[in-house]
Amino acid sequence: MRSRDVVAYIILFGVAIFLLGFVGFLWLKNIGWYSLWLLGIIEVGLIIAIGYLFARYAISPIVEQNVELDKMVQNTLHEINIPVATIQANASMLKRSCKDKKAQKKIERIEAASRQLLELYQDLEYAIKEEISKEDREVFDVAEVVRQRLELFEDLLRQRELQVTLQPLYVRLPKRGFIKVFDNLLTNAIKYSKKGALIKIIVQDGSFVIQDSGIGIDEAELLKIFDRYYRAEAKSQGFGIGLHIVKSFCDKEQIPIAIESQKDRGTRIKLDLRRVRV
């Protein structure tokens, strides 16, 4: 707090105490109500001013620290994009010039890791834009996004039976947000179903549906699955935030979400995208 503000705070506090005592004196002397009301209003104004000064300088260090932290995160995030792009470009050049198959496999792993880093960058960028309510909405085809994401999940899906029905469905949404929703839903379907289990993904009639034949969920648990940190099984991997992310996105974009599940029979989740359909 600057010295002049300290002086102002002390003066205001002193005047407020003096007026408070003066009002009490007038009350005892039974001076007219008009004077008491006037002094009371002045007293309230002084108390509000004192409270404002106190709150401002008590909280300002925390606010300034958060602002600096946000700037640091945004600057670091911006800088991350540069080395990732460099890694991708050089890996691509090496792959074209390299004839050894084993070396090419290693380069492909480098490319896959750089893509994962880029996705983390995009996730952080989306989170920051969402925090300041500046996330970009764009028109995209849900079916095409699903097709692209399935390619990335190819290794995880090798031990599952996949049935896909994709019809073009253009929507206007934060694309990165929808990708996070899809990734979380598909990851859950894979995680909670056994090898060889059937997973259905349907984009049709203005809706997106993902259905698995996994462990399912009890009716009692259905009320809690969207809670942050809730996990259907305590031993399962993860932190229990996936479905919370899905629900938060759907609530924000006003997308109705329906879930049906039976224990040991599987789970079906449907997003009604007709309201955001283009």
Image (cartoon, rainbow, N blue to C red):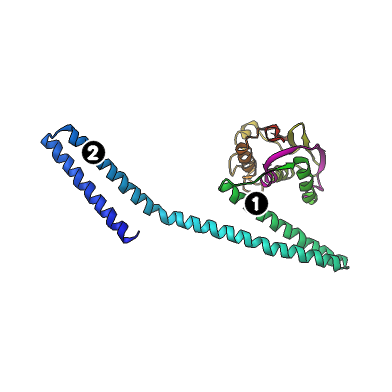
Q: Residue at x 26, y 50 (%)?
A: 12
The residue type indicated by label 2 comes to Gly
Residue 124 drawn at (x, y percent): 62, 53
Residue 214 drawn at (x, y percent): 74, 39
The residue type indicated by label 1 comes to Asp
Q: Is residue 250 left or right of residue 29?
A: right
> Is residue 170 part of the magenta span, yes or no?
yes
Residue 264 seen by the camera: no
> 28 or 186, which lies in front?
28
Tell me how many marks there are.
2
Residue on which the image places disc 1: 123
Residue 46 drawn at (x, y percent): 27, 45
> 162 or 179, which lies in front?
179
Q: CA distance from mark 1 to mark 2?
A: 54 Å
Q: Which disc, if any, is residue 40?
A: 2
Residue 24 seen by the camera: yes
Q: Which residues are magenta?
A: 156-180
Secondary structure, mark 2, is helix
